[in-house]
Amino acid sequence: MGITLELAQAAVQAAHQKSLELGVKMNIAVVDAGANLVAFARMDDAWLGSLDISIKKAKTARFFDMPTGDLGKISQPGGPLFNIEHSNTGLITFPGGIPIADSTGRIVGAIGVSGDSVENDHIVAEAGRVAVANR
């Protein structure tokens, strides 16, 4: 079983709150264990181009059960997964996507955030992940 709508919405709400604290405008996507979109929020005036990126970050994190930034490190030229971003109809291999585990540690979905620097994207996604992990 994947993430519930209630938990996905909690992740989006926590990520939204962190975005407000940082003063950034984000697109926030949560997918279930099958990488299907469950919840999404686009903050007012968030970049339209980041909408698709946030969803792909969430899917990428779930497809490989690792943060997208970690996947990016091993997909650089000369790395063992070089060019992996061209698989699965396009992956995102920079920070902002994080798997979401339940209280038992089982991966139930993932969150993807896009709209500012990759550092802030990751911070906001982490806030969403933590909101679910703490339930």
Image (tube, rainbow, N blue to C red):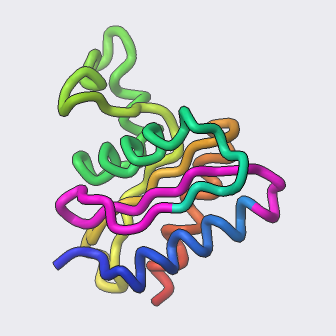
Question: Residue 22 appears in which quarter of the rendering?
Answer: bottom right
Q: Is residue 24 magenta?
A: yes
Q: Residue furthest bottom?
A: 135
Percent position (x, y) of residue 106? Answer: 25, 74
* Residue 83 percent coordinates (x, y): 27, 16
Residue 102 in the image: state x and y as whole percent. 34, 80
Task: Look at the image and give the residue range highlighted in magenta.
Answer: 20-40
Residue drawn 28% across the image and 17% down it = 82
Closer-to-camera residue (66/132): 132
- Please tell me whether residue 41 belongs to the stretch shown in magenta: no
Which image quarter: residue 16?
bottom right
Residue located at (51% from left, 73% from top): 11
| Residue 16 in the figure: left or right of residue 4 | right
Picture quarter with the N terminus: bottom left
In the image, residue 116 sits, relative to residue 85, either above or below, namely below
Q: Position of residue 15 (x, y in %)?
A: 61, 65
At a point 39% along the width and 33% down the height, the residue shown is 92
Who is closer to the viewer here, 117 or 51? 51
Q: Is residue 105 above or below residue 93?
A: below
Would residue 69 appear left or right of 127 to someone viewing this image? left
